[in-house]
Image (cartoon, rainbow, N blue to C red):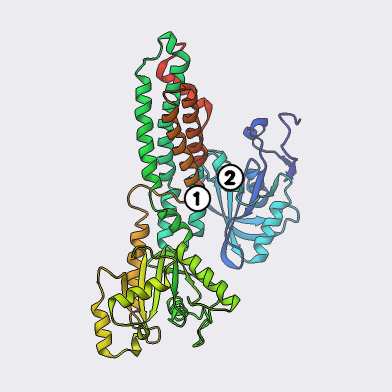
Amino acid sequence: MEEAGDPVGGTHTWDGQPNRLPKKWRHRDVLRDTIFALSSGHGKCGVSVIRTSGPASLDALQLLTRRKQLPSPRKVTLTPIFCPKSEELLDRGLVVWFSGPHSFTGEDCCEYHVHGGPAVVRGVLQALGGIDTLRQAEPGEFTKRAFQNGKLDLTEVEGLGDLIHADTEVQRRQALRQMSGELGKLYQRWSNRLMTAVAHIEAYIDFSEDDNVEDDVLTAVDEEVQRLRKELEEHLSDSRRGERLRDGIHVVLAGATNAGKSSLLNVLCQRPAAIVSPIPGTTRDVVETTLNIGGYPIIMCDTAGLRDSEDPVEKEGVRRAKERQGEADILVAVVDSSMVGLDKDYLLAHLQGFLFARLQADDFSGVILVLNKVDLLQQSTFNHLQGLCGDPDLPTFCLLSCHSGQGVGDLLAILRRHLEDLCGDPMEGSPSITQVRHRQHHTKCLEALQQYSVYREQDLVIAAEELRIALRQLGMITGKVGAEDILDIIFRDFCIGK
């Protein structure tokens, strides 16, 4: 073990004087590696940001800038940046010093804003790597340290990741709301209430015989558990809108062969994403592309035309098409308008015949009917079909021509309304579940609360354990739960032992 006065991880000399780590970092309990990495994107750019975090950040800053006086925290300073070994000037850049705990990670941090040329970035990274108290950061390690130092909970960490990967405006708004801590605060409020219930029931079990705990405490616990169950059930009954926004809403194009599904996909994504051919059965597999419609992220899937075929490859394509229909959040049924009868019953039968994997008992929720190739229709036929719009027995539909572009704007407007109904505005109402992990822990928490009610009259000790299980499941979402918290509530609320 190193002596208290020894430098941690070695000594550097600068101007002939040993350069030691700050005294506050010499205690064994707070020793940590100092890490560094490029925090901005790779490739040529105007400015790149390189970050360090840990007890040797000040040491590295002094070595690279030759500054004896520490820059003011959170203020940008223009300075030359040198290589400590060769003493070569690497760049003239900006440095920002963040003194812990007032930093992203909660540790001493420094950011180097340098010119974004690969040679400059490589030179600064090599200079930092040449300091033996620093090491290259592992993926996500800066954010991991922020979590470990209490700067972020797990939901905020996940929100930060979602913000970095957000492709659309609605995704950005949802990620910002989660990163602000609103979702974590909701879960923490539930945890605090459940923690109080656990503490009270444990106090009743351990101390009720000594008359230190009143009998009506169990009634209060029962009422609190019922309230929590109701709130959790409402939170879980959100139609997965938060997860859909995060991962993308699945929109599936389905219908008979040569109805124009691939042409419609190409029109919507404005590029030849799928092969278009007059030969029936051209599309054999699922073709996916991502789109941004009104700020909502969608995964548009073109599927094989539905028909009976002896070709084993096409049969597999049809099977996959039917499978995707069942998984779709929104199903766009594409119909060749020149090939169907004008009678509403015939049109319904046509839909039922091809879309049986999705439609049951005339349920058209989440279905959009597209009558394609209307440029081939006579005006009287077009007017007749247009008169069917709004018929309550038919799904929402529009008349469209992939060839002329007629009706494409109408389809986009209909799609946007469906997306808004499906996902809503992430900034309104209670924050939504955004991760499958959250839903799994909430479900297990709710199951444990339900089991509490089952065991409540049979065995109070087992019932209390179910509450502890529920509390652990909530704690796994935010990363915050501990036995010490329960003990604090027991002694605070009951003053047991004085």
User: Residue 196 versus residue 265: which sits nearer the camera?
Assistant: 265
Q: What residue type is labelled 1?
A: Val
The x and y percentages for residue 274 are 52, 79
User: Residue 83 versus residue 195: which sits nearer the camera?
Assistant: 195
Residue 29 shows in the view: yes
> As drawn, is 416 to the left or to the right of 272?
left
The residue that appears at 38% across and 42% down in the rendered structure is 233
The residue that appears at 48% across and 15% down in the rendered structure is 206
The residue that appears at 47% across and 22% down in the rendered structure is 459
The x and y percentages for residue 488 are 47, 23
Picture quadrant where residue 418 is located: bottom left
Residue 410 shows in the view: no
Q: How crowded is mark 2: few (under 14 residues within 10 Å), some or many (20 or more)?
A: some
Q: How many labels does the image show?
A: 2
Quarter of the image where the N terminus is located: top right
> Helix, strand, or loop for circle 2?
helix
Dot label at residue 168: none
Q: Earlier in the sequence, mark 2 or mark 1?
A: 2
Q: Name the residue under label 2.
A: 144
Q: In this view, does 209 lie above or below 108?
A: above
Picture quadrant where residue 336 is located: bottom left
Q: Name the residue under label 1.
A: 436
The x and y percentages for residue 159 are 48, 51
Q: What residue type is labelled 2?
A: Lys
User: Residue 75 versus residue 121: which sits nearer the camera?
Assistant: 121
